[in-house]
Image (cartoon, rainbow, N blue to C red):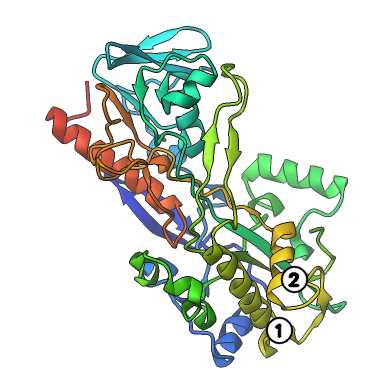
Amino acid sequence: MYPRLAALTVSDREVEIGFPKKWDSEFAKYLDNTQRDGYPRNLDINSGSPIGLGVLQSSIADGNRVTAATALLSDTPKNLTVLTGQAVVKVVCDDQRIKGVATESGIIFARKEVVLSAGALDTPKILLLSGIGPQSELEKLDIPCIRDLPGVGKNLHDRLFMELVTVRKPGTPYRTSYRPSSPEDLDEARKQWAQDETGPFSEFFLPQMIGYLRSKALVESEEFKGLASEHILSASVASPEQYLAGAVSFMSLQSSGTVNLRSKDPSDPPFVDPKFLEDAFDKRVAIEAVREAFKFLNSPSLSRDHVRFAAEPDSMSDKDVLAFVSKAATSMWHMCGTMAMGEWWSPNTCVDKEFRVIGLEGLRVVDMSVVPFLPSAHTQAMAYLIGQTAAEKMIAGYNYLDPSP
């Protein structure tokens, strides 16, 4: 059994979180010794004050992944019908009112309104295919514009992260000892999981320590001083046999990208350009974060059994660190902002505070695309909060307090 916590209560249901079933044999030492090395301890990263090192809480319960579906739809409401294999192509509009959605196999009409929750990449794609977005861009693809909304697909924010891996001395305690290491072990692990949901598959890929660190060099940098975002400071490689790895996630990034259509064909994926590291501040974040991460991994508590880094910059100069990040970093899939909620006068605003798409009736967007900038936190809880907030607004708006038919 996993140690379990109630992480988030949505309506009368709980989205459970828990801790790993097995711990690294030296994990407690790491946590104690890094505190002595000067890194503050944080007993609850989700408390609202995240700075410090602590124990990672995972979306796992009894060895199973917990999702919004498993947590909230285990007892499906009688008035909910879930259709699978029905990819939405576009929304159906009649004189500025959305009447339903077109799928690959037909049209589904809405009695009251359509709520689009396809995420920060596919939500703008569906709306652009529907003729909702920047008119000049739609005209290039011969898509009739039913609502000129310049912010659709713009203001894309995403988070970069990378892994730093240290190769450790032979015989050092390491986590891969309880991972399947051969085809035979993999088959045995599958059988064990199918039988009673235990074994290696119930333990796989669970990081244990997490930390939010604030770089003094970054806060004192000219790039930081030039920001207008006051919310930033508010509380809110192939693996070697034996290794210690740390994932470095870059917070408060300022660059914004775009999501555009490649063609009128709904089967074509959108063209996504996150424009990572275009902002001078983002470059400074990456440089100082990597320096801080190497300093952390080289601390006395963690470097005792190190042999070498699996990969590292040629030097710790700005140029070499940035080149290293450009090669090694990738998206954390925390996309948001492409249907931003905001003031009516902002060019990027697409939805109002009720989640309604500006200038259209019968259409709301309820997903991370409405968040105008990335929070300095994991986006999972925010995504759940967005859904709950929108639901409360719709229930109040329709005076519909009893969801039973």
Task: Pick the residue in front: 162 or 196.
Answer: 162
The dot on residue 43 is none
| Residue 79 rendering spot, x and y as whole percentages | 29, 22
Q: Secondary structure at mark 1?
A: loop
Please tell me in which quadrant of the rendered image residue 392 appears: top left
Q: Label 2 to label 1, Cα distance in Å?
A: 19 Å
Task: List the residue tagged with mark 2.
Answer: 320
| Residue 75 rendering spot, x and y as whole percentages | 37, 33
Instruction: Please report the residue visible at 53 percent of the width from the left and 12 percent of the height from the top.
Output: 104
Task: List the residue tagged with mark 1.
Answer: 298
Quadrant that contains the C terminus: top left
Quadrant that contains the N terminus: bottom right
Instruction: Please report the residue visible at 58 percent of the width from the left and 30 percent of the height from the top.
Output: 270
Q: Is residue 359 above or below residue 238?
A: above
**Badge 1 density bin: few <14, some 14–19, many ≥20, Cα 10 Å:** some
Task: Pick the residue in front: 119 or 263.
Answer: 263
Query: Which of label 2 and label 1 is nearer to you?
Result: 2
Task: Identify the amino acid type marked 2.
Answer: Asp
Residue at the far bottom in the pictured view: 36
